[in-house]
Image (cartoon, helix red, strand yellow):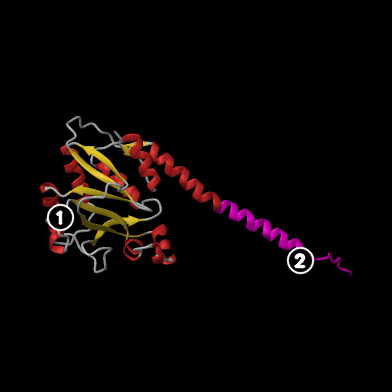
Amino acid sequence: MWLLRLPVHPSGFRGQSLRTFAKTLGILALIPAFYLMLAIIGAVVPGGADHDEGPKTREILLVHGPIHYDLLLPLDAETIEKFTPLAAHGIWLDHPEARWLVIGWGAEHFYTQTRTYTDLSLPAIFSGITGDRTVLRFDIAGVLAEDLPARRVRMTQQQYAALLESIWSSFALAPEGTPQRLDVAGYTSSDGFFAGLGRFNILRTCNVWIGERLRAAGLRFGLWTPMPLSVSLSYDLYQAE
């Protein structure tokens, strides 16, 4: 019996593979665009409710960095009292020139190992996307530069007290109820990293944490703010004066 033998054209298979590869790349390219779209929607959709009609006597700062926001709290008596345990771990709260307490939250591997963009590594990026333990970074700052990219958030005394409590609740405390400083180098001579509660991933980023703290304080803010753009947009919509 004779078998019908069809001619094989390798170039045909290569063409099909290239088309499949191009289609796959197109789909992958849509993922960041879809994430960006959701990040904008999450910033626009309001969460929390500002029902406190008392006088807004307290003010904090949101400071924009390349990839995330930091919280800056005034280093007054109330703030120092709340975070006094940090002093035992090297955070000099009563430094004579200190005016602000700088607070950041993020993925342990990425945050502690990526001091500059030259320190970026694929393992750090991968763990940040898929999930990692969390840390809080605390530092002190003096008089701020006039051109600092900061947004001012005004709130009532009750809201400020709730904000302090919400930040404190982000610590993974030791059995004796005190923050746990990590044995890693900081970014400056005055900062430190502390163990945090919860997990970091691409859906719960450092910027999402910022929105969570503000809503927990009783402020209206975007429901999901995974990017600096989200925080900026949500601030302009709900907190700018």
Relative image position of residue 104 (x, y in whole percent) = 28, 54
Residue sitting at the far right: 1
Q: Is residue 71 left or right of residue 46?
A: left
> Which residue corresponds to mark 1?
97
Task: Name the image quarter holding residue 28.
Answer: bottom right
Relative image position of residue 47 (x, y in whole percent) = 32, 37
Q: CA distance from mark 1 to mark 2?
A: 73 Å
Q: Nearer the viewer, mark 1 or mark 2?
A: 1
Q: Bin the neighbour count of mark 1 within 10 Å (Cα to Cα): few under 14, some 14-19, many 20 and up.
A: few
**Residue 24 inside the magenta-drawn segment:** yes
> Which residue corresponds to mark 2?
10
The residue closer to the viewer here, 226 or 197, is: 226
Q: Bin the neighbour count of mark 2 within 10 Å (Cα to Cα): few under 14, some 14-19, many 20 and up.
A: few
Query: On the rendered image, what quadrant is the N terminus found in?
Result: bottom right
**94 w.r.t. 60: above or below:** below
Q: Is residue 203 visible?
A: yes
Q: Secondary structure at mark 2?
A: helix
Relative image position of residue 88 (x, y in whole percent) = 13, 63
Query: On the rendered image, what quadrant is the C terminus found in?
Result: top left
Magenta segment boundaries in residue numbering = 1-28
Q: Amino acid at mark 2?
A: Pro
Q: Amino acid at mark 1?
A: Glu
The secondary structure that most of the magenta stretch takes on is: helix
The residue closer to the viewer here, 2 or 76, is: 76
Please say if the residues under marks 1 and 2 sit with CB atoms less than 8 Å apart.
Answer: no
Q: Is residue 203 left or right of residue 172?
A: right
